[in-house]
């Protein structure tokens, strides 16, 4: 079974980038000209990490599966302890005979015993292991992290606060930041509505490390952002 996390790469097309830029309010021209480069830098590392982050449901499901395995391990250990001396010897010999393709008279008994004892030791370690880590809290899931980054990018480019407004007649969000988030999310795979995440970002105001990391990850882009306006 592979333990690799599938890679997700987002390549913003020129058409998508044009729609995203169009969703932004007026911004300093030198910053607006860098939106495409900023978003592509974001997609290369931070966004890729967010999109491969598993959901709380996936973490819970895996923990349930591990608990099933641990239960079967306990049952297996109880069955092993119930064996008599001959049976305990047999569970060492039979796997070794199958592995080596030998017969009972020529089997490597010492290796057979070592493999059995090591397996039993592993089972004991498994059933005594601590519970897995708790799933991340709701405000730390993928959508929250994506919107946190977008809020930082929006403020970096426009100089405006990334606030969401509510239309009291329709109860639907609107405003420059919401339009920007909507335009970006339309290009992201497997991302549901970000309405709740926008609300949480505004509530917790924890900020995003994306902009702070630009100077280390993308120094050329950082120098362009730091350059004084013409």
Image (cartoon, helix red, strand yellow):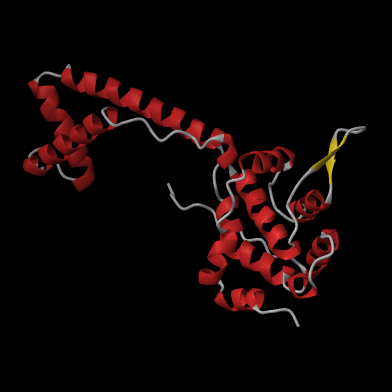
Would residue 106 be seen by someone viewing this image from the given angle?
Answer: no
Q: Quadrant of residue 224?
A: bottom right
Is 104 on the left-hand or right-hand side of 224?
A: left
* Left/right of residue 18 with respect to residue 107 in the rendered view: right
Total numbered labels placed on residues in the image: 0
Percent x, y for residue 14? 79, 70
Q: Is residue 219 above or below residue 88?
A: below
Name the one closer to the observer, 222 or 39: 222
Q: Residue at x 82, y 53 (%)?
A: 176
Front-lying residue, 48 or 172: 172
Q: Quadrant of the rendered structure where residue 73 is?
A: top left
Quarter of the picture containing the C terminus is: bottom right
Q: Position of residue 19 (x, y in %)?
A: 84, 62
Residue 213 percent location from the top left of the image:
53, 64
Can you name the residue that lies furthest to the bottom here? 230
Q: Is residue 107 left or right of residue 63?
A: left
Residue at image position (14%, 29%) is 90
**24 relative position to 55: left or right:** right
């Amino acid at each position: 079974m592979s333990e690799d996390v599938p890679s997700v790469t987002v390549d913003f097309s020129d058409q998508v980038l044009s729609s995203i830029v169009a969703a932004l309010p007026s911004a300093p021209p030198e910053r607006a000209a860098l939106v495409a480069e900023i978003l592509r830098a974001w997609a290369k590392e931070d966004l890729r990490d967010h999109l491969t982050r598993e959901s709380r449901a996936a973490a819970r499901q895996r923990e349930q599966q591990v608990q099933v395995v641990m239960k079967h391990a306990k049952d297996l250990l109880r069955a092993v302890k119930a064996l008599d001396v001959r049976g305990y010897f047999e569970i060492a010999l039979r796997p070794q005979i199958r592995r080596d393709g030998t017969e009972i008279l020529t089997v490597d008994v010492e290796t057979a015993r070592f493999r059995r004892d090591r397996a039993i030791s592993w089972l004991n370690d498994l059933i005594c292991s601590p519970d897995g880590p708790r799933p991340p809290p709701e405000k730390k899931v993928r959508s929250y992290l994506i919107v946190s980054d977008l809020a930082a990018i929006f403020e970096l480019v426009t100089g405006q606060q990334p606030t969401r407004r509510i239309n009291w007649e329709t109860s639907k969000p609107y405003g420059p930041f919401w339009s920007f988030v909507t335009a970006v999310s339309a290009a992201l795979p497997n991302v549901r509505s970000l309405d709740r995440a926008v609300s949480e970002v505004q509530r917790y105001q924890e900020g995003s490390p994306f902009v702070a990391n630009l100077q280390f990850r993308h120094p050329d882009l950082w120098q362009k952002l730091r350059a004084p306006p013409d």
